[in-house]
Amino acid sequence: MMPIGSNLSLFDHPFNNLLGCLTLNGNQWGFFFKDDTSSLSYCFLSAIIVCRPCIHVERKVLNTLAYLCDGDARVALNGLQMAVQSQVASCPGVEGPEQPLHPHSCSIVLIREEHVKEGLQRSHLLYDRAGEEHYNCISALHKSLRGSDENAGLYWLARMLEGGESPLFIARRLICFACEDVGLADPAALSQAVAAFQGCHLIGMPACEVILAQCVTYLARAEKSVEVYQAYAAAKACVREHQGPLPPVPFHLRNAPTALMKNLGYGIGYKYNPNFEGPVEQRYMPAELKSVKFF
């Protein structure tokens, strides 16, 4: 089968919206669209499909490729070519890769969305930053760190970064992990994660890869505790599930910046802790919740 890339020579008019082209090898070119990338990529792919009348491609396939290629027509063309080659090889009676498809052949090759995604997945090109793979990979990273598997953590980090994921998105999730899963078992983990986010923001890709790798490794090796995470979840549930009006703030805990508030009893009876040696007996929860414990 003739490589799809060779059909680029069939275009007589240049694309005015192309930022440029990069020669890869022989007849393979990479195009990067400047505006409305999905629409332009779709038109580009549609034009090439016209060149191969015995290949039928579902409209959804072109929409998916145009979206996933992120303006890089080379990625879209390669993905389409891999899908076509795979289906031609599995379709009896259709010419093989070494023989061009005859325009009047009675054999029809139907390309569906799953064929394209499967081909891209095998070639490590697929990483849908707005779809399921985006959430699958960040979930795998989170669970790997929770399980203290530093090797798996680095793998999923590399998988996302190589797929074009935003380093700041990953860094934000690492900050959440430092609080939710490491917590007070290693308070320095939060500082490490925040510093990683700041470093990524300052220097960007690709230099910030190692910053994230260091943070991922630190979090994987850190002691884990969900004590604070679970305690705060219990506090939220206490507030949300309370029946009736929420209990008032005890008078001795209220601020009293004005004489009127003092006359109303705000702040009266409060024991200022630094004035006492040792623990101070004082109620801080509303009276009806005095026995509630979140830890």
Image (spheres, rainbow, N blue to C red):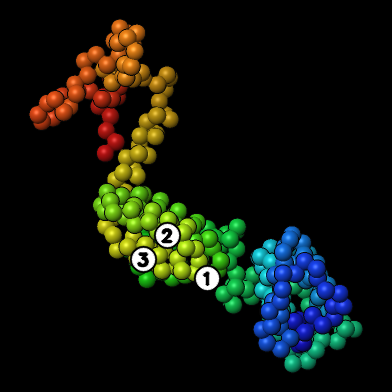
Split into 4 quadrants, where in the image is the C terminus?
top left
Badge 1 amino acid: Glu
Q: Residue 173 in the image: x percent, y percent?
A: 44, 54
Badge 3 amino acid: Gln
Identify the mark nearer the N-term, 1 or 2. 1
Badge 2 amino acid: Gly
Q: Residue 293 in the image: x percent, y percent?
A: 27, 33
Measured Cα–Cα span from mark 1 to mark 2: 19 Å
Quarter of the image where one finds residue 25: bottom right
Q: Residue 14 in the image: x percent, y percent?
A: 83, 74
Measured Cα–Cα span from mark 2 to mark 3: 12 Å
Q: Residue 191 in the image: x percent, y percent?
A: 33, 53
81 sits to left or right of 280:
right
Identify the mark nearer the N-term, 2 or 3. 2
Where residue 208 is drawn, which disc sits there? none
Identify the mark nearer the N-term, 3 or 1. 1
Q: Which residue is mark 2?
A: 199
Q: Which residue is mark 3?
A: 214
Identify the residue at horizontal 41%, vertical 64% (top origin). Answer: 212
Q: Is residue 229 above or below residue 172?
A: above
Q: Is residue 205 above or below residue 280?
A: below
Identify the residue at horizontal 32%, vertical 63% (top origin). Answer: 218
Q: Which residue is mark 1?
A: 162
Quarter of the image where one finds residue 61: bottom right
Report helix, strand or loop for mark 1. Answer: helix
